[in-house]
Image (cartoon, rainbow, N blue to C red):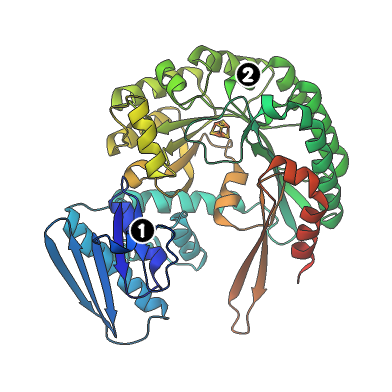
Amino acid sequence: MFIVRSNLAKFEYDIHSLIKAFYPEKEVKILTPGSVVKNMTLLSENPAMRLDFCGGKVVFKTYLPDEHTYEWEYDGSTYDSVDYKNAFKRFLYKALSEETGTTLPWGNLTGIRPTKIAMSMLEQGKDEKEISDLLQKEHFVSGEKINLSIDIAKREKELLQTLHYENGYSLYIGIPFCPTTCLYCSFTSFPIRVWKERVADYLSALEKEMDYAAEAYKNKVLDTIYIGGGTPTSLSAPELERLLTKVKSSFNLSGLQEFTVEAGRADSITGEKLEVLKKYGVTRISVNPQTMKDETLKLIGRQHTVSQVVDAFHIARECGFDNINMDMILGLPNENEEDVMHTIEAVEELAPDSLTVHSLAIKRAAAMQGWVAENGITSLHNTEEMIRIAADGARRMSMFPYYLYRQKNMAGNFENVGYARAGKYGIYNILIMEEKQTIIALGAGTITKKVTRRTMEDGSENVLIRRCDNVKEVAGYIERIDEMIERKRKLLEEA
Ligand code: SF4
């Protein structure tokens, strides 16, 4: 673990994110004067780094193990200004880059939506050169990632043109069950076999939430629906039919542009279930291999085989689905460039309509290290070459990158990119990333986001994003459904 002492609490999050980006395999603990420390022994440990803020001056020292000192002085405004924060992040990035002898593909951008900058600059009428200059000079983003950001932002802008930002909304429904839990899972997911007996109660609670949402937004246009989780197809065919009957009877689907259901795990997909999805107007599904290597699938706890993925894909085509996404993950345990090449070639043979390329996100480094030791894993890394192999594969399938996001602690500090053939884009995926439209989210562990636009006195537009969440636990969600609806009512009725 890296202990980092700072005499100022203000930039704790930024300091943590940047140091973690340079040292992804380390747990990083920032100690500031206000830190609440449960493990008191940490207080007596020698720090790996130290930051001292004194007026406009910052002294950054590293002890790894030799002592190095980096100094910076800012003349002008206070810690509260955005300028100060941005300048401080540039200083810290440069110091860490010198310390490690490396640069990061996304420079000092540590947030999860790097395309947001390019998107908002395009909307302000800025040209590509201005966007590129800002990303390079202010944030040290690599040329390749700058091009990717601009390319995606332009495509997103075009795709969102047909949406009803003001008078429209999207709907997310979470089904928090999966056949088994994947070892890297960071979603709300519980094994279906444990919760089988409560699925009916869960659906009843969801139906109550649907009634409320449909009534609250009855005068708005429903643009997209996404049923995710978890794995919605963990439900049986009759349970799926019950869910989709309710969606159809509650909401006005006449303006719907996209209806996605994440079928996801091949071990949950049957022809009978896919027929139900088709019958109720689902337009887009996912069949996710993650890798086309059986050994890895076993290692990561997915408990299905490559041949099950291939079969599920063919069944989906036979059912008439003409918009099928496949997900793959780079940086999986014991996988190298050759394995990624094998996966992308096997995916190409199936010819899906879109491909989402994830970089493995390691939520807790300590837990992951335990897993690595227990399973005899010899490699766990993502490389630029793997990213390139996947991007080349997408290009060969005539797909374009159309959305991008990052998660904390991603292998190689890279990104997740969605590719699709023209006309097969997942609009909901862009909406969730760019926060352009209200998304009402129903089900355990989901978060509703309300987007409000206001025109300010100077004519500029102010976008306000407010959230409310549902409890993650299935039993808690069922028992406290009235409270979940009340939370939503408060948010949606707020001016
Ligand atoms: S399929 Fe997805 S949601 Fe389900 S356990 Fe695996 S990673 Fe989690």
- For this rendering, which residue is in front, 222 or 363? 363
Q: Mark 2 or 1, which is nearer the eye? A: 1
Q: Quadrant of the C terminus?
A: bottom right
- For this rendering, which residue is in front, 130 or 2? 2
Left or right? Give the position of 139 relative to 291.
left
- For this rendering, which residue is in front, 217 or 234? 234
Residue at horizontal 66%, vertical 69%? 453
Residue at horizontal 68%, vertical 27%? 194
Task: Using the image, determine if residue 217 lies above or below residue 340.
Answer: below
Q: Ligand 1 is in which quadrant of the figure?
A: top right
Left or right? Give the position of 210 relative to 469.
right
| N-term mark: 2 or 1 | 1
Q: Which residue is mark 1?
A: 29
Image mark for residue 317 = 2
Image spot of residue 331 (x, y percent): 36, 34
Residue at horizontal 13%, vertical 64%? 68
